[in-house]
Amino acid sequence: MKKTLFVIILAMASLFTLQAQDIQLPEPQRDGGLPLMEALQQRSTQREFSDKALELQELSNLLWAANGVNRPDGKRTAPSARNCQEIDIYVYTEKAVYLYLAEQNKLQLVAEGDHRSDAAVQPFAAKCPIILMFVANYDKMKGMDKDAQEFYGATDAGYVSQNVYLYCASAKLNTVVLGSIYRDKIKDLLKFNGKAILGQPVGYAK
């Protein structure tokens, strides 16, 4: 009886540790990599990915390059209109969806479960280790009308996407930017006030 009870407790403990939770990322590595002109030469779109999960250090570097804090005043690696910093990056994985908190270098759990198939229209994206989802958060765009929110949200998402492309070129990762995404499903799941602009799968080469 005691042995059976111990097994049950151990199984429950294991289940708990497997549940998705917030993730503190390691400090991003801000040096090294290819020189800019070489990264531009290597920049390309690739639609084939290994199913190998990205290492946490790689993910931290990637997200910092995309739109991380690069100055003491809190400004970012990507520009934004009026410094609204309105582009939120959601990270879709096989276990959960997270919001990247740049100031804390942390992934905040938003939704448990594998939602990659409800993110991008293209079937290959559902098997990519991660999909980065760029969302224009209108709550951060005070004083802008709808046209301005849509224009600057789309423009600023483009800057972030290009940062991802250049990092991937330098780190020998595959990536592709996707405009065909399930915007309604994404908004229903993540509950934000704004618009999902682009999705960008990232992974190791096959």
Image (spheres, helix red, strand yellow):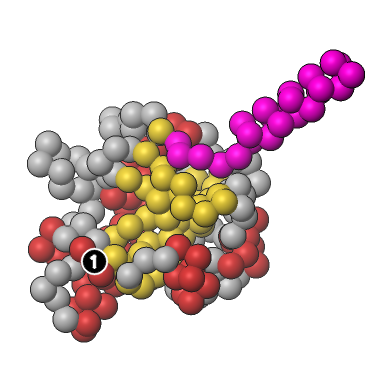
- Taking the image as shown, residue 155 lies to the left or right of residue 1, namely left
Q: Quadrant of residue 137?
A: bottom left
Q: Residue 15's quadrant in the figure?
A: top right
Q: Indicate the amino acid at tag 1.
A: Asp
Q: Would you call the spot at circle 1 few (<14 residues within 10 Å), some (14-19), or many (20 or more)? A: few
Magenta stretch contains residue 13? yes
**In the displayed structure, would residue 195 be above or below residue 80?**
below
> In the orientation shown, which residue stands out farthest toward the front?
1
Q: Residue 71, position in %: x, y?
A: 14, 39
Q: What type of secondary structure mainly makes up the magenta span? A: helix
- The spot of residue 63 in percent (x, y) is 37, 45
Say left or right for 56 vs 77: right
Residue at the spot 52% in from the left edge and 72% down from the top edge? 185
Residue at (18% x, 68% y) in the render: 141
Asked whether, in this view, residue 126 is left or right of residue 160, the answer is: right
Q: Which residue is the extreme one toward the right?
A: 1
- Which residue carries the number 1 mark? 139
State the residue in front, 91 or 167: 91
SS at circle 1: helix
Residue 135 appears in the picture as rendered: yes
Q: State the image coordinates of residue 46 (x, y, percent, origin top left).
A: 53, 58
Residue 57, x across and y down, in percent: 44, 32
Residue 160 belongs to magenta span? no
Most extreme residue toward the bottom is 147
Q: Is residue 193 above or below residue 91?
A: below
| Closer to the camera in the image, 12 or 34 | 12
Q: Is residue 177 visible?
A: no
* Residue drawn 16% across the image and 81% down it: 145
Q: What span is in magenta?
A: 1-23
Query: Measured along the vertical axis of the image, is residue 90 above or below residue 19?
Result: below
Please give left or right for residue 127 compared with residue 159 in the image. Answer: right
* The N terminus: image quadrant: top right
